[in-house]
Image (cartoon, helix red, strand yellow):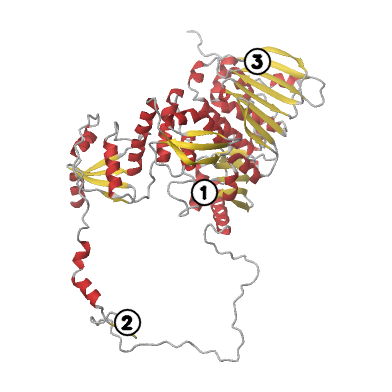
């Protein structure tokens, strides 16, 4: 029998490595910008077209490479960062594996121009699918210029599973944020289809965060600074009142490198305990300085998962540091035992008059069990004739206060789910009750129906939005006073991409200068008191929701808008509002589930209720 095990060709091995390192266009941006940082660049410019699917161009003014180094950089595991296994435990650079360029060249058309400051001419290399097409001397600026075209051109299965341009651009923006925040001394620019998204000047940490996330971020930041023998922690956390219902502004950095750590995230959430509105997350930008030997960053090819030697101790330090910072800024009550100075206790002024103690007057004849006294006459307490009448006729206070009885509607829908189909036909509508400002309870023949009021409203609005999109005529309600909306660059870029879909829904919104928009109209199906707030909430929902295909982009926007504009929990509903909500829900084509597939209603059977009393 012949041997069957053989070595893979380099081109195939590089494509396999690319599957781990290069998952989408944002991965290319991350790896090449990190290489620019390691090259000592003070200015980095990123140009992408079609969210990086067509072109990714990254230019830096770093040290550049010699002709030999430029060619060797595309070989697997070729790196200048480590020479022995021990070097893996004292890494201070961003890249070190030597896989990035080889992986990129295996699945794209790559051109590089690079030149060292001391060289007269630079080097040009052209590689397609790991095949070197050309290498020659060329005239170019100091530093390195990468052009990556037609990503995944030879791996159609990978290219097929890329998301829409909006989603891929969102990931590129995230990668730029993760690199720009810990490097405020570096000028970084990002352009998409020749339109500027970020042009970040050299600055400090706070100003860099404001440049990335908008002017509103400045007033929410609370400074954190804690130095210990184990780790130094500095940065900022957000005030609780500015917390959001979605993730997006939570960042950990260790020695200048972004990383994720659910355990440390819990330390921060614990510090905010009983301070946050329900189902919200605070923003935080925390930087860790720690000995390189005490962490392991060689855990995952993307280097975003890092192991800490003393993670339990660091957890306690994080929790204490955040809690102390919130206390110092009067976000939580705190006692400062290191307060300098003395406490001034006021002393009475000297006076010729003697100071006398206040006299307490006591009515020794007062009888608390005396029933015929109820109004003050000195210290006597006698009942008034009006109160006597109230006590004798107290039942009349509750006359006419019975719950409103809702006429029984007939809902006969052909639903696939037999349990819910039964609930629709047996809904009696006799009585409804709002529980915890979150659920609506109503009896049905088989037990008790419980409806989630927010999800029910989301389902109603979603089906209305989908009907609007399908119809030719869109009802838009003009605003008496147009609203101005100013966004951070990332949100502005996202809004520009979905404006056509918003117009089809009935929004009248247009650009008004850099990162500023004018809202002149809203969908007629919405009762919008604050249109700018609705758009901001829409962006929050949309940028954290995956869009599987471009054809489903409109549906996803309808989902996000229904979630953003639906009524929140914690709102008391009038009986008429409850009735309207229930009628609208049961008139929907799919009343059982919210637009994103969560259960809207459930039935607690009479048998289950009886069992709970028989235990």
In space, the residues marked 2 and 3 are separated at their CA atoms by 98 Å
For mark 1, what is the residue? 242
Q: Secondary structure at mark 3?
A: strand
Q: State yes or no: discs 3 and 1 in contact (Cβ < 8 Å).
A: no
Would you say residue 246 is visible in this rendering?
no
Task: Please give the name of the residue rendered at 50% of the width and 34% of the height, measured from the top-left corner.
Answer: 509
State which tag comes first along the sequence, 2 or 3. Answer: 3
* Viewer-nearest of discs 2 and 1: 2
For mark 3, what is the residue? 127
In space, the residues marked 3 and 1 are separated at their CA atoms by 48 Å
Q: Secondary structure at mark 1?
A: helix
Residue 160 horizontal/vertical position (percent): 48, 19
Would you say residue 388 is visible in this rendering?
yes
Who is closer to the viewer here, 442 or 294? 442
Residue 478 horizontal/vertical position (percent): 45, 37
Who is closer to the viewer here, 385 or 330? 385
Judged from this view, the residue extending furthest toward the front is 480
In space, the residues marked 2 and 1 are separated at their CA atoms by 50 Å
Give the mark count: 3
Task: Please give the name of the residue rendered at 21% of the width and 55% of the height, measured from the top-left corner.
Answer: 402
336 over 590 or under it: above or below:
below
Q: Secondary structure at mark 2?
A: strand
Residue 237 horizontal/vertical position (percent): 56, 49
Q: State yes or no: discs 2 and 1 in contact (Cβ < 8 Å).
A: no
Q: How many other residues sit within 10 Å of disc 1, few (<14), some (14-19) or many (≥20)?
A: some
* Viewer-nearest of discs 3 and 1: 1
Mark linked to residue 376: 2
């Amino acid at each position: 029998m012949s041997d069957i095990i053989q070595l893979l060709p380099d081109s195939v091995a590089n494509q396999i490595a690319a599957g781990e390192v290069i998952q989408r266009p944002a991965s290319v941006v991350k790896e090449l910008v990190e290489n620019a940082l390691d090259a000592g660049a003070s200015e980095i410019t990123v140009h992408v077209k079609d969210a990086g699917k067509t072109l990714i161009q990254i230019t830096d003014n770093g040290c550049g490479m010699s002709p030999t180094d430029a060619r060797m950089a595309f070989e697997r595991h070729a790196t200048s960062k480590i020479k022995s296994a021990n070097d893996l435990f004292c890494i201070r650079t961003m890249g070190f594996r030597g896989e990035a360029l080889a992986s990129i060249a295996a699945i794209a058309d790559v051109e590089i121009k690079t030149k060292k400051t001391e060289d007269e001419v630079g080097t040009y290399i052209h590689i397609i699918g790991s095949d070197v097409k050309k290498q020659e001397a060329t005239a170019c600026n100091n530093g390195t210029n990468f052009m990556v075209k037609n990503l995944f051109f030879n791996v159609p299965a990978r290219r097929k599973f890329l998301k829409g341009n909006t989603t891929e651009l969102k990931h590129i923006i995230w990668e730029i944020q993760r690199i720009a925040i810990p490097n405020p001394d570096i000028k970084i620019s990002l352009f998409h289809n020749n339109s500027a998204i970020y042009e970040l000047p050299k600055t400090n940490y706070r100003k860099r965060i404001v440049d990335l996330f908008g002017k509103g971020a400045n007033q929410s930041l609370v400074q954190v600074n804690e130095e210990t023998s184990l780790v130094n922690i500095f940065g900022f956390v957000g005030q609780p009142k500015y917390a959001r219902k979605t993730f997006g502004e939570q960042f950990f950095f260790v020695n200048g490198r972004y990383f994720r750590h659910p355990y440390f995230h819990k330390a921060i959430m614990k510090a905010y305990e009983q301070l946050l509105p329900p189902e919200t997350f605070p923003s935080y930008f925390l930087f860790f300085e720690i000995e390189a030997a005490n962490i392991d960053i060689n855990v995952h090819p993307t280097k975003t998962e890092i192991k800490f030697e003393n993670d339990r101790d660091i957890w306690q330090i994080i929790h204490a540091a955040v809690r102390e910072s919130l206390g110092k800024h009067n976000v939580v009550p705190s006692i400062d035992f290191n307060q300098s100075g003395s406490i001034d206790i006021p002393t009475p002024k000297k006076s010729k008059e003697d100071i006398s103690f206040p006299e307490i007057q006591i009515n020794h004849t007062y009888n608390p069990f005396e029933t015929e006294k109820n109004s003050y006459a000195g210290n006597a307490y006698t009942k008034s004739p009006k109160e006597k009448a109230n006590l004798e006729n107290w039942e009349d206070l509750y006359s006419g206060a019975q719950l409103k009885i809702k006429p029984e509607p007939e809902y006969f829908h052909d639903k696939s789910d037999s349990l819910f189909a039964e609930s629709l036909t047996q809904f009696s509508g006799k009585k409804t009750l709002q529980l915890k400002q979150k659920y609506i309870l109503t009896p049905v023949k088989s037990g008790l129906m419980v409806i989630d009021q927010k999800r029910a409203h989301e389902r109603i609005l979603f089906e209305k939005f989908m009907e609007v999109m399908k119809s030719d005529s869109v009802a838009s309600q003009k605003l008496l006073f147009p609203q101005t909306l100013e966004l951070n660059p990332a949100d502005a870029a996202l809004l520009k991409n979905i404006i056509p879909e918003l117009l089809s829904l009935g929004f009248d919104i247009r650009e008004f200068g850099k990162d500023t928009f004018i809202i002149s109209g809203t969908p007629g199906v919405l009762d919008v008191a604050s249109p700018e707030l609705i758009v901001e909430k829409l962006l929050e929902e949309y940028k954290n929701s995956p869009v599987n295909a471009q054809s489903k982009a409109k549906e996803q926007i309808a989902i996000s808008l229904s979630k953003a504009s639906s009524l929140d929990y914690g709102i008391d509903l009038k009986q008429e509002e409850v009735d309207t909500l229930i009628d609208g829900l049961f008139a929907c084509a799919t009343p059982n589930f919210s637009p994103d597939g969560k259960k809207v209603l459930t039935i607690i059977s009479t048998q289950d209720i009886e069992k709970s009393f028989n235990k």
